[in-house]
Image (cartoon, rainbow, N blue to C red):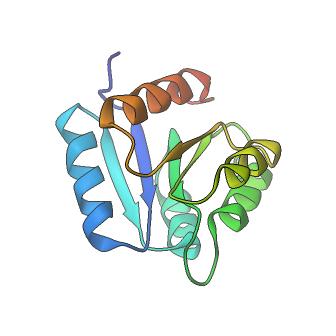
Amino acid sequence: MEHNNKSILVVDDDLDLRYMLSARLISVGYRVYGAANGWDALEQMEKHLIDVVLTDYHMPEMDGFGLLSLCRAKWPGTPVVVFSGERDDIAHEAVERGAFAWVRKGSEFTMLLECLDSAIQHSVHT
């Protein structure tokens, strides 16, 4: 899939993980923005056209579900992928709450990339 001009917002309070994911996504052609928590993510979404949000579930101040809810309300055409090491029941709940998908932390990068590519195809900005 062509990634040029497609943007991903990576939201995770783990700075090292956020940088590593961002670097990998940039290496395959995505524009990447980063945020340390849900409030930072909302600020980034106000400033930039975001095609897909990739968010951790467990974060301080606002968890991934809080961010998901606000994204669904304000940017309903922007897919949100929840990226977490939490239990599988969290995955089910994420999708029930409107997430495009849930990907387990530690999954192979190709699996995450396939999920993001699929989400891009469902983005209103495509």
Q: Residue at x 58, y 66 (%)?
A: 42
Residue 14 visible to an observer of this rendering: yes
Q: Residue at x 28, y 41 (%)?
A: 25
Whether residue 42 is situated above or below residue 88 in the rendered picture? below
Q: Residue at x 31, y 42 (%)?
A: 31
Q: Residue 121 at what x, y percent from top left?
A: 54, 20
Residue sitting at the far top: 1
Q: Residue 38 at what x, y percent from top left?
A: 58, 70
Quadrant in which the N terminus is drawn: top left
Front position in the image: 77 or 67: 67
Give the number of callouts.
0
Front position in the image: 32 or 18: 18
Whether residue 5 is situated above or below residue 17 in the rendered picture? above
Residue 126 visible to an observer of this rendering: no
Front position in the image: 99 or 58: 58
Q: Residue 88 at what x, y percent from top left?
A: 66, 49
Q: Residue 39 at what x, y percent from top left?
A: 58, 75
Q: Horizontal placement of 102 versus 109: left or right?
A: right
Q: Quadrant of residue 119?
A: top right
